[in-house]
Amino acid sequence: MAEIVVVRHGQAAFASDDYDRLTEVGWEQARLLGEYFFGAEQQFDAVFSGTMRRHRETLSGIHDAFSLSTITLPAAQETSALNEYDFHRLVDSYIEMYGNKLDGVSVDLANASSFYRFLRLALLAWSRDELSNVAEPWSAFEQRVKGILATLSAVKGRVLVVTSGGPVSAMLREALNLSVAAMIASNLQTKNTGVTRYFTRGEQFSLNMFNAVPHLEMAPHRHLISYT
């Protein structure tokens, strides 16, 4: 039996000119997660990561906690299969087709709450192949996640995976046979540096933990819990 530990990236720079980077909060979240892994003496036999800057920076923050110890992290195997879907393009495509109003009122997409309400609608439309001008069809997104799951299930030992909320929830959909609506709901509640753990036997996945932040739950760090 193998163990797969899936981590969503730290807080990214929402409503900035470059979302694909960690904020100071995101770096702190990643370092605290690394300290949690180190304190629990969790050694990893393999590490996989998406190729986005926020994935690499999250892994770097985790790695800092191991840098002065005798426990080392294996070199990361980077793969675009763990990258996020293009949520900005999905929202733009949805607005191009249906407009930017919610309940008849135009909204400011720089507001995170409004943006994620539109993202929920865009994801549902994407899953029904209703959006135009998107680079990756829904079916292709699901297939690449299935492919990386097959790769991960073939690795022996404990595997650390750093990715984004979309692949986190798509993996959950595969493991638990969730509906698309349930997958989207789980996607939009994934915490930054949230930990999801599976035990695997072959290609059978048993969920042990979802979206947990034990490294942020104590009072001194609770203010660091975020979702962007």
Image (cartoon, grey):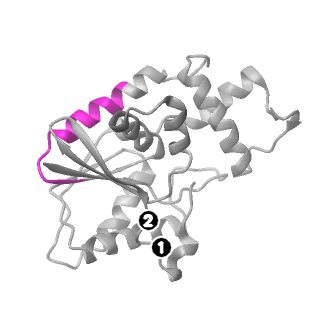
Secondary element type, mark 2? loop
In the rendered image of this protein, does residue 8 appear above or below residue 200?
A: below
> How crowded is the residue under tag 2: few (<14 C-alpha within 10 Å), some, or many (20+)?
many
Q: Name the residue under label 2.
A: 213
Q: Are marks 1 and 2 in contact (CB under 8 Å)?
A: yes
Query: Magenta includes 144?
Result: yes
Main secondary structure along the magenta-highlighted residues:
helix
Q: Give the range drawn in magenta.
A: 143-159
In the rendered image of this protein, does residue 105 appear above or below residue 77?
A: above
Q: Nearer the viewer, residue 185 or 162?
A: 185
Is residue 135 visible in the rendered structure shown here? yes
Q: Which residue is drawn at 47% across and 46% down?
A: 165
Q: Position of residue 166 (x, y in %)?
A: 47, 40
Q: Where is residue 95 in the image (x, y as percent from the top left)?
A: 73, 28
Query: Please, what is the three-letter code of the amino acid marked with disc 1?
Result: Glu
Which image quarter is the C terminus in?
bottom right
Could you give the CA–CA distance between mark 1 and mark 2, rounded to whole angstroms? 6 Å
Q: Which residue lies furthest to the bottom in this view?
A: 220
Query: Magenta includes 228?
Result: no
Q: Residue furthest right?
A: 104
Q: Name the residue under label 1.
A: 217
Q: Position of residue 199 (x, y in %)?
A: 22, 49
Left or right of residue 76, residue 202 in this image: left
Q: Which residue is drawn at 54% across and 56% down?
A: 12
Q: Residue at x 14, y 44 (%)?
A: 155
Q: Which residue is drawn at 31% across and 30% down?
A: 146
Q: Which of 104 and 85 is in front in this view?
A: 104
Instruction: Please identify the quarter of the rendering in which residue 38 is found.
Output: bottom left
Is residue 83 visible in the rendered structure shown here? no
